[in-house]
Protein backbone atom coordinates (compact mmCIF):
# COMPACT_ATOMS: atom_id res chain seq x y z
CA UNK A 1 0.00 0.00 0.00
CA UNK A 2 1.61 3.20 -1.16
CA UNK A 3 0.81 6.45 0.64
CA UNK A 4 1.80 9.86 -0.66
CA UNK A 5 2.71 11.99 2.35
CA UNK A 6 2.33 15.72 1.69
CA UNK A 7 3.02 17.73 4.86
CA UNK A 8 2.83 21.17 3.20
CA UNK A 9 3.37 24.33 5.23
CA UNK A 10 3.22 25.67 8.75
CA UNK A 11 2.10 23.17 11.36
CA UNK A 12 1.45 20.70 8.52
CA UNK A 13 5.04 19.55 8.87
CA UNK A 14 4.96 18.78 12.58
CA UNK A 15 1.51 17.21 12.71
CA UNK A 16 2.10 14.96 9.70
CA UNK A 17 5.34 13.78 11.31
CA UNK A 18 3.29 12.53 14.28
CA UNK A 19 0.74 10.79 12.05
CA UNK A 20 3.58 9.10 10.16
CA UNK A 21 5.02 7.92 13.46
CA UNK A 22 1.65 6.40 14.35
CA UNK A 23 1.32 4.71 10.94
CA UNK A 24 4.78 3.19 11.23
CA UNK A 25 3.96 1.86 14.69
CA UNK A 26 1.18 -0.26 13.15
CA UNK A 27 3.74 -2.44 11.41
CA UNK A 28 1.66 -2.78 8.28
CA UNK A 29 3.21 -3.06 4.81
CA UNK A 30 2.89 0.65 4.10
CA UNK A 31 5.20 2.41 1.71
CA UNK A 32 5.32 6.11 2.61
CA UNK A 33 6.68 8.59 0.11
CA UNK A 34 6.94 12.27 0.99
CA UNK A 35 6.75 15.22 -1.41
CA UNK A 36 6.57 18.99 -1.23
CA UNK A 37 3.28 20.81 -1.62
CA UNK A 38 1.97 24.35 -1.09
CA UNK A 39 4.32 27.18 -0.19
CA UNK A 40 7.11 24.70 0.51
CA UNK A 41 6.84 23.43 -3.07
CA UNK A 42 6.60 26.95 -4.46
CA UNK A 43 9.90 27.85 -2.78
CA UNK A 44 11.71 24.95 -4.42
CA UNK A 45 9.85 24.35 -7.70
CA UNK A 46 8.14 27.69 -8.32
CA UNK A 47 4.70 26.04 -8.16
CA UNK A 48 2.53 24.93 -5.21
CA UNK A 49 1.58 21.67 -6.93
CA UNK A 50 4.60 20.50 -8.96
CA UNK A 51 4.03 17.79 -11.58
CA UNK A 52 6.13 15.35 -9.55
CA UNK A 53 3.91 15.80 -6.49
CA UNK A 54 0.73 15.40 -8.53
CA UNK A 55 2.17 12.29 -10.20
CA UNK A 56 2.99 10.78 -6.82
CA UNK A 57 -0.52 11.55 -5.52
CA UNK A 58 -2.04 9.92 -8.62
CA UNK A 59 -0.04 6.71 -8.33
CA UNK A 60 -0.44 6.31 -4.56
CA UNK A 61 -3.30 4.33 -3.02
CA UNK A 62 -4.04 7.25 -0.72
CA UNK A 63 -2.74 10.70 0.14
CA UNK A 64 -2.02 11.96 3.65
CA UNK A 65 -2.02 15.74 3.58
CA UNK A 66 -1.04 18.29 6.23
CA UNK A 67 -1.99 21.88 5.51
CA UNK A 68 -0.95 24.66 3.15
CA UNK A 69 -0.73 28.43 3.28
CA UNK A 70 1.11 31.29 4.87
CA UNK A 71 0.40 35.02 4.98
CA UNK A 72 3.67 35.66 3.23
CA UNK A 73 2.14 34.39 -0.01
CA UNK A 74 -0.87 36.73 0.15
CA UNK A 75 0.41 38.91 -2.66
CA UNK A 76 1.21 36.10 -5.07
CA UNK A 77 -0.96 35.74 -8.14
CA UNK A 78 -3.85 33.41 -7.42
CA UNK A 79 -2.60 30.47 -9.47
CA UNK A 80 0.64 30.29 -7.46
CA UNK A 81 -0.81 30.60 -3.97
CA UNK A 82 -0.32 27.58 -1.69
CA UNK A 83 -4.11 26.99 -1.52
CA UNK A 84 -4.07 26.16 -5.22
CA UNK A 85 -2.22 22.96 -4.33
CA UNK A 86 -5.08 21.48 -2.38
CA UNK A 87 -7.66 22.78 -4.86
CA UNK A 88 -5.59 21.29 -7.69
CA UNK A 89 -5.29 17.93 -5.94
CA UNK A 90 -9.04 17.83 -5.34
CA UNK A 91 -9.75 18.66 -8.97
CA UNK A 92 -7.10 16.47 -10.61
CA UNK A 93 -7.85 13.47 -8.43
CA UNK A 94 -11.63 13.92 -8.77
CA UNK A 95 -12.10 14.13 -4.99
CA UNK A 96 -15.66 15.40 -5.06
CA UNK A 97 -16.91 13.99 -1.75
CA UNK A 98 -15.54 15.52 1.41
CA UNK A 99 -16.45 13.87 4.72
CA UNK A 100 -16.02 16.08 7.77
CA UNK A 101 -17.24 14.35 10.88
CA UNK A 102 -17.77 16.50 13.96
CA UNK A 103 -17.61 14.27 16.98
CA UNK A 104 -17.50 15.61 20.51
CA UNK A 105 -15.35 13.28 22.54
CA UNK A 106 -16.78 12.71 25.97
CA UNK A 107 -13.45 13.76 27.51
CA UNK A 108 -13.65 17.12 25.74
CA UNK A 109 -17.18 18.36 26.43
CA UNK A 110 -15.65 21.03 28.66
CA UNK A 111 -13.48 22.31 25.82
CA UNK A 112 -16.47 23.30 23.65
CA UNK A 113 -17.56 26.92 23.61
CA UNK A 114 -21.16 25.68 23.92
CA UNK A 115 -22.77 24.36 27.09
CA UNK A 116 -21.74 20.75 27.73
CA UNK A 117 -25.33 19.46 27.51
CA UNK A 118 -25.67 20.86 23.99
CA UNK A 119 -22.62 19.02 22.68
CA UNK A 120 -22.25 15.92 24.87
CA UNK A 121 -22.45 12.91 22.58
CA UNK A 122 -22.50 15.04 19.43
CA UNK A 123 -21.74 12.98 16.33
CA UNK A 124 -22.62 14.62 13.05
CA UNK A 125 -21.22 14.23 9.57
CA UNK A 126 -20.87 17.10 7.14
CA UNK A 127 -20.57 16.03 3.54
CA UNK A 128 -19.22 18.85 1.43
CA UNK A 129 -19.18 18.78 -2.36
CA UNK A 130 -15.56 19.56 -3.17
CA UNK A 131 -14.93 20.08 -6.87
CA UNK A 132 -17.66 22.46 -7.99
CA UNK A 133 -19.44 25.62 -6.86
CA UNK A 134 -17.94 29.09 -6.69
CA UNK A 135 -14.52 27.56 -5.95
CA UNK A 136 -14.16 26.35 -9.52
CA UNK A 137 -16.34 28.73 -11.54
CA UNK A 138 -14.78 31.38 -13.75
CA UNK A 139 -13.14 34.05 -11.60
CA UNK A 140 -12.27 37.54 -12.70
CA UNK A 141 -10.39 40.21 -10.81
CA UNK A 142 -7.15 42.05 -10.24
CA UNK A 143 -4.96 39.01 -10.34
CA UNK A 144 -6.90 36.78 -12.72
CA UNK A 145 -6.76 37.51 -16.41
CA UNK A 146 -9.79 36.74 -18.54
CA UNK A 147 -9.06 36.08 -22.23
CA UNK A 148 -5.50 37.21 -21.69
CA UNK A 149 -6.18 40.62 -20.18
CA UNK A 150 -6.80 41.84 -16.67
CA UNK A 151 -10.03 43.70 -16.06
CA UNK A 152 -9.97 47.01 -14.23
CA UNK A 153 -9.05 47.10 -10.59
CA UNK A 154 -12.51 48.09 -9.41
CA UNK A 155 -14.43 44.95 -10.13
CA UNK A 156 -14.05 41.27 -9.33
CA UNK A 157 -16.34 38.28 -9.49
CA UNK A 158 -16.44 34.53 -9.14
CA UNK A 159 -19.06 32.32 -10.68
CA UNK A 160 -21.17 29.92 -8.66
CA UNK A 161 -22.18 26.91 -10.70
CA UNK A 162 -23.31 23.32 -10.38
CA UNK A 163 -24.44 20.84 -12.96
CA UNK A 164 -27.09 18.23 -12.38
CA UNK A 165 -24.66 15.26 -12.54
CA UNK A 166 -22.39 16.94 -9.98
CA UNK A 167 -25.28 17.36 -7.58
CA UNK A 168 -26.60 13.86 -8.22
CA UNK A 169 -23.34 12.13 -7.39
CA UNK A 170 -22.81 13.97 -4.10
CA UNK A 171 -26.47 13.40 -3.22
CA UNK A 172 -26.02 9.64 -3.72
CA UNK A 173 -22.94 9.67 -1.51
CA UNK A 174 -24.86 11.56 1.18
CA UNK A 175 -27.97 9.34 1.09
CA UNK A 176 -25.77 6.26 1.28
CA UNK A 177 -23.86 7.66 4.25
CA UNK A 178 -27.14 8.58 5.95
CA UNK A 179 -28.41 5.06 5.36
CA UNK A 180 -25.45 3.69 7.33
CA UNK A 181 -26.18 6.05 10.21
CA UNK A 182 -29.49 7.39 11.52
CA UNK A 183 -31.21 7.70 8.13
CA UNK A 184 -31.60 11.43 8.41
CA UNK A 185 -30.19 13.84 5.85
CA UNK A 186 -30.25 17.63 5.87
CA UNK A 187 -29.49 19.30 2.55
CA UNK A 188 -28.28 22.86 3.02
CA UNK A 189 -28.88 25.40 0.26
CA UNK A 190 -29.76 29.01 -0.48
CA UNK A 191 -32.55 28.18 -2.88
CA UNK A 192 -34.50 31.27 -1.84
CA UNK A 193 -31.91 33.49 -3.53
CA UNK A 194 -29.57 31.52 -5.80
CA UNK A 195 -30.38 29.68 -9.05
CA UNK A 196 -27.49 27.31 -8.39
CA UNK A 197 -29.07 26.17 -5.15
CA UNK A 198 -32.57 26.04 -6.56
CA UNK A 199 -31.17 23.39 -8.90
CA UNK A 200 -29.36 21.79 -5.97
CA UNK A 201 -32.57 21.47 -4.00
CA UNK A 202 -34.53 20.03 -6.93
CA UNK A 203 -31.88 17.46 -7.77
CA UNK A 204 -31.39 16.33 -4.16
CA UNK A 205 -35.19 15.87 -3.90
CA UNK A 206 -35.18 13.81 -7.12
CA UNK A 207 -32.39 11.55 -5.88
CA UNK A 208 -34.29 11.12 -2.61
CA UNK A 209 -36.87 9.04 -4.46
CA UNK A 210 -34.27 6.25 -4.60
CA UNK A 211 -33.76 6.35 -0.82
CA UNK A 212 -37.24 6.23 0.68
CA UNK A 213 -35.87 4.88 3.95
CA UNK A 214 -33.89 8.08 4.57
CA UNK A 215 -35.70 11.21 5.71
CA UNK A 216 -34.67 14.38 3.92
CA UNK A 217 -35.04 17.96 5.08
CA UNK A 218 -33.96 21.08 3.24
CA UNK A 219 -32.52 24.00 5.17
CA UNK A 220 -31.27 27.43 4.13
CA UNK A 221 -27.65 27.96 4.95
CA UNK A 222 -28.18 30.92 7.27
CA UNK A 223 -30.67 28.94 9.30
CA UNK A 224 -28.33 25.93 9.28
CA UNK A 225 -25.55 28.10 10.70
CA UNK A 226 -27.90 29.15 13.47
CA UNK A 227 -29.28 25.67 14.19
CA UNK A 228 -25.75 24.28 14.40
CA UNK A 229 -25.07 26.34 17.50
CA UNK A 230 -28.63 26.20 18.82
CA UNK A 231 -29.28 22.47 18.70
CA UNK A 232 -26.40 20.70 16.95
CA UNK A 233 -27.54 17.25 17.99
CA UNK A 234 -30.68 17.65 15.88
CA UNK A 235 -28.47 17.04 12.83
CA UNK A 236 -27.10 13.73 11.67
CA UNK A 237 -25.78 13.90 8.10
CA UNK A 238 -25.59 17.28 6.37
CA UNK A 239 -24.89 17.61 2.65
CA UNK A 240 -24.06 20.90 1.02
CA UNK A 241 -22.03 22.68 -1.66
CA UNK A 242 -18.39 23.55 -1.61
CA UNK A 243 -18.60 27.06 -0.20
CA UNK A 244 -21.32 26.52 2.41
CA UNK A 245 -19.59 23.28 3.40
CA UNK A 246 -16.32 25.10 3.94
CA UNK A 247 -17.96 27.51 6.36
CA UNK A 248 -20.35 25.14 8.15
CA UNK A 249 -17.66 22.52 8.69
CA UNK A 250 -15.47 25.01 10.55
CA UNK A 251 -18.47 25.98 12.65
CA UNK A 252 -19.33 22.34 13.37
CA UNK A 253 -15.71 21.64 14.20
CA UNK A 254 -15.70 24.23 16.91
CA UNK A 255 -18.70 22.61 18.60
CA UNK A 256 -16.49 19.68 19.40
CA UNK A 257 -14.02 21.74 21.38
CA UNK A 258 -11.36 22.28 18.81
CA UNK A 259 -10.85 22.13 15.10
CA UNK A 260 -7.58 20.48 16.09
CA UNK A 261 -9.49 17.25 16.69
CA UNK A 262 -11.23 16.84 13.36
CA UNK A 263 -10.09 14.63 10.54
CA UNK A 264 -11.46 14.66 7.03
CA UNK A 265 -11.58 12.44 3.99
CA UNK A 266 -11.94 13.59 0.40
CA UNK A 267 -12.97 10.72 -1.82
CA UNK A 268 -13.29 10.03 -5.52
CA UNK A 269 -15.89 7.75 -7.06
CA UNK A 270 -13.79 4.66 -6.31
CA UNK A 271 -13.11 5.64 -2.68
CA UNK A 272 -9.56 6.59 -3.40
CA UNK A 273 -8.87 9.54 -1.22
CA UNK A 274 -6.93 12.34 0.32
CA UNK A 275 -6.97 12.62 4.08
CA UNK A 276 -6.25 15.82 5.92
CA UNK A 277 -7.07 17.55 9.18
CA UNK A 278 -9.98 19.99 8.85
CA UNK A 279 -7.83 22.83 10.12
CA UNK A 280 -5.27 24.97 8.31
CA UNK A 281 -1.55 25.62 8.52
CA UNK A 282 -1.70 27.96 11.55
CA UNK A 283 1.45 29.92 10.66
CA UNK A 284 1.24 31.74 14.00
CA UNK A 285 2.21 28.60 15.92
CA UNK A 286 4.18 26.79 13.21
CA UNK A 287 7.38 25.15 14.34
CA UNK A 288 6.67 25.73 18.01
CA UNK A 289 5.59 22.18 18.78
CA UNK A 290 2.22 23.37 20.11
CA UNK A 291 -0.14 22.12 17.40
CA UNK A 292 -2.60 19.32 18.08
CA UNK A 293 -1.65 16.34 15.89
CA UNK A 294 -4.83 14.38 16.68
CA UNK A 295 -6.83 15.59 13.67
CA UNK A 296 -4.08 14.33 11.38
CA UNK A 297 -3.64 11.09 13.31
CA UNK A 298 -7.42 10.52 13.08
CA UNK A 299 -7.24 11.36 9.35
CA UNK A 300 -4.69 8.57 8.99
CA UNK A 301 -7.22 6.28 10.68
CA UNK A 302 -9.90 7.34 8.18
CA UNK A 303 -7.41 6.61 5.39
CA UNK A 304 -6.86 3.09 6.65
CA UNK A 305 -10.60 2.51 6.88
CA UNK A 306 -11.87 4.09 3.65
CA UNK A 307 -9.06 3.65 1.15
CA UNK A 308 -6.86 0.82 2.41
CA UNK A 309 -9.42 -1.62 3.81
CA UNK A 310 -7.63 -1.77 7.17
CA UNK A 311 -10.55 -1.18 9.52
CA UNK A 312 -8.89 -3.00 12.43
CA UNK A 313 -5.85 -0.74 12.25
CA UNK A 314 -8.14 2.31 12.08
CA UNK A 315 -9.94 1.11 15.21
CA UNK A 316 -6.60 0.70 16.97
CA UNK A 317 -5.63 4.29 16.25
CA UNK A 318 -9.02 5.64 17.32
CA UNK A 319 -8.91 3.68 20.59
CA UNK A 320 -5.37 4.90 21.22
CA UNK A 321 -6.54 8.50 20.80
CA UNK A 322 -9.38 7.84 23.25
CA UNK A 323 -6.94 6.34 25.72
CA UNK A 324 -4.64 9.32 25.51
CA UNK A 325 -7.53 11.72 26.08
CA UNK A 326 -8.78 9.63 28.98
CA UNK A 327 -5.31 9.75 30.48
CA UNK A 328 -5.74 13.53 30.56
CA UNK A 329 -3.21 14.59 27.93
CA UNK A 330 -4.13 17.80 26.11
CA UNK A 331 -2.51 20.11 23.62
CA UNK A 332 -3.17 23.80 24.28
CA UNK A 333 -6.25 24.01 22.05
CA UNK A 334 -8.15 21.41 24.11
CA UNK A 335 -6.61 22.06 27.47
CA UNK A 336 -8.82 22.68 30.48
CA UNK A 337 -8.05 22.86 34.18
CA UNK A 338 -7.08 19.53 35.69
CA UNK A 339 -5.59 18.08 32.51
CA UNK A 340 -1.97 17.88 31.50
CA UNK A 341 -0.72 20.20 28.78
CA UNK A 342 1.55 18.54 26.24
CA UNK A 343 3.17 19.51 22.96
CA UNK A 344 2.77 18.05 19.49
CA UNK A 345 5.48 15.43 19.80
CA UNK A 346 4.51 14.29 23.26
CA UNK A 347 0.92 13.80 22.07
CA UNK A 348 2.10 11.74 19.09
CA UNK A 349 4.38 9.67 21.31
CA UNK A 350 1.50 9.04 23.70
CA UNK A 351 -0.70 7.75 20.87
CA UNK A 352 2.10 5.44 19.73
CA UNK A 353 2.55 4.25 23.31
CA UNK A 354 -1.17 3.58 23.66
CA UNK A 355 -1.14 1.70 20.36
CA UNK A 356 1.71 -0.47 21.44
CA UNK A 357 0.10 -0.94 24.86
CA UNK A 358 2.74 0.82 26.91
CA UNK A 359 1.37 2.72 29.88
CA UNK A 360 0.78 6.43 29.63
CA UNK A 361 2.06 8.40 32.57
CA UNK A 362 -0.60 10.48 34.21
CA UNK A 363 0.39 13.48 36.25
C1 LIG B 1 -10.56 23.76 3.73
C2 LIG B 1 -9.71 24.98 3.50
C3 LIG B 1 -9.50 25.15 2.01
C4 LIG B 1 -10.87 25.38 1.39
C5 LIG B 1 -8.52 26.24 1.60
C6 LIG B 1 -7.17 26.06 2.24
C7 LIG B 1 -8.38 26.34 0.11
O1 LIG B 1 -10.31 26.09 4.10
O2 LIG B 1 -10.13 22.66 3.32
O3 LIG B 1 -11.63 23.89 4.31
O4 LIG B 1 -11.38 26.50 1.37
O5 LIG B 1 -11.45 24.41 0.92
MG1 LIG C 1 -12.02 25.63 5.25
Image: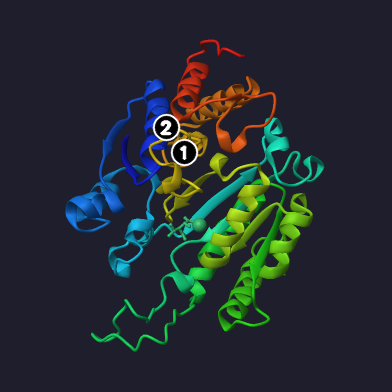
Query: From the Cβ of disc 2, is ligand 1 less than 8 Å away?
Result: no
Left or right of 56? Residue 258 is: right
Residue occupying the point 44% across, 46% down: 284
Helix, strand or loop at label 2? It is: helix
Instruction: Specify the label residue 339 is tagged with.
Output: none
**Residue occupying the far right of the picture:** 117
Query: Residue 47: x, y in percent?
Result: 23, 58
- Calculate the distance from the C-alpha at mark 1 to the C-alpha at mark 2: 6 Å
Query: Residue 253: x, y in percent?
Result: 61, 49
Q: Residue tagged by mark 1?
A: 296
Give the colour scheme of this rendering: rainbow
Query: Residue 307: x, y in percent?
Result: 43, 42
Q: Residue tagged by mark 2?
A: 19
Helix, strand or loop at label 1? It is: helix
Question: Mark 2 or mark 1, which is nearer the start of the sequence?
Answer: 2
Residue 26 or 332: which is nearer the viewer? Answer: 332
Q: Are marks 1 and 2 in contact (CB under 8 Å)?
A: yes
Up-down relation of residue 230 to residue 66 (above or below): below
Residue 228 or 197: which is nearer the viewer? Answer: 228
Residue occupying the point 45% across, 60% down: 96
Point out the image quarter for the N terminus.
top left
Query: Residue 362: x, y in percent?
Result: 61, 14
Residue occupying the point 64% across, 75% down: 190
Amino acid sequence: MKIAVLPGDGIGIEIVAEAVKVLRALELPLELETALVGGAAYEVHGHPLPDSTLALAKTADAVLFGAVGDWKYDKLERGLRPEQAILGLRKHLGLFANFRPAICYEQLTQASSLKPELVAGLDILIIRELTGDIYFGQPRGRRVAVDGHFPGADEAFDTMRYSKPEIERIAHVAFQAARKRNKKLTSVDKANVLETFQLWKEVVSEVHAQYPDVSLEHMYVDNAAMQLVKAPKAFDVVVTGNMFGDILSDEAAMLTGSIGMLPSASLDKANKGLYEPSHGSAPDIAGLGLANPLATILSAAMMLRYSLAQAAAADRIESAVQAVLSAGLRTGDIWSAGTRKVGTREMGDAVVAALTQKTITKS
